[in-house]
Image (cartoon, rainbow, N blue to C red):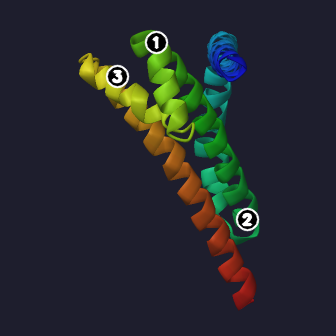
């Protein structure tokens, strides 16, 4: 009888722990969405400024050997601004279209899975312009990251030749 009561108690404790963990995860997701809603407008402005700085300042500086390392580092840093904006935007899109389920699936895919989940959600809901925008920002993010690395490597190649 005592073993049976112990088993029932352990089972109930396990259920309570599971419910508690699910509650914490749910609050984390709801809090992340709440924070993302407040941060996203600022990120859009920061992204616009970073894009103009990359195009108008850093790309011309990448032409000159003396400023190439600085330009490459700046372009590389800007890619993280683009990536953060993309991730937050994807989080909001995933939550709006597929709810908590979409967010959980995206987070289970290593966190970065929120972006492909947002692309899939907009694709399945025939939101073609948003699919294009998500793909464009993804291309800008990785394009500037690889461009920044390439420009910095070109700067190092010149430093070793001299």
- Residue 135 placement: quadrant: top left
Element assignment for label 3: helix
Q: Residues within 10 Å of mark 1 (few under 14, many from 20)?
A: few
Q: Residues within 10 Å of mark 3 (few under 14, many from 20)?
A: many
Q: Could you tell me if the residues under marks 3 and 1 are in contact, i.e. CB atoms within 8 Å?
A: no
Relative to 52, does residue 27 appear above or below in the rendering? above
* Residue pointed to by mark 1: 99
Percent position of residue 77, x then y: 70, 47
Residue closer to the observer: 94 or 26: 26
> Would residue 66 be found to the left or right of residue 127 on screen?
right
Percent position of residue 96, x then y: 46, 10
Element assignment for label 1: helix
> Would residue 142 be found to the left or right of residue 22 on screen?
left
Kindly report the distance in space between the C-alpha atoms of the residues bearing marks 3 and 1: 10 Å
Relative to 3, does residue 41 appear above or below in the rendering? above
* Residue pointed to by mark 2: 69
Q: Could you tell me if the residues under marks 2 and 3 are in contact, i.e. CB atoms within 8 Å?
A: no
């Amino acid at each position: 009888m005592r073993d049976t009561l112990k088993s029932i108690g352990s089972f109930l404790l396990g259920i309570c722990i599971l419910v508690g963990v699910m509650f914490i995860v749910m609050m984390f997701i709801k809090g992340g969405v709440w924070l993302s809603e407040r941060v996203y407008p600022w990120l859009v402005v920061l992204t616009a400024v970073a894009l103009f700085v990359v195009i108008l300042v850093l790309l011309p500086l990448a032409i000159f050997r003396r400023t190439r390392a600085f330009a490459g580092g700046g372009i590389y840093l800007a890619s993280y601004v683009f990536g953060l904006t993309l991730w937050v935007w994807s989080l909001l899109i995933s939550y709006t279209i597929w709810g908590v389920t979409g967010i959980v699936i995206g987070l289970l895919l290593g966190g970065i899975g929120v972006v492909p989940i947002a692309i899939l959600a907009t694709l399945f809901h025939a939101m073609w312009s948003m699919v294009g925008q998500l793909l464009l920002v993804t291309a800008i993010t990785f394009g500037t990251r690889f461009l920044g690395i390439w420009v910095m490597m070109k700067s190092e190649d010149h430093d070793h030749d001299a």
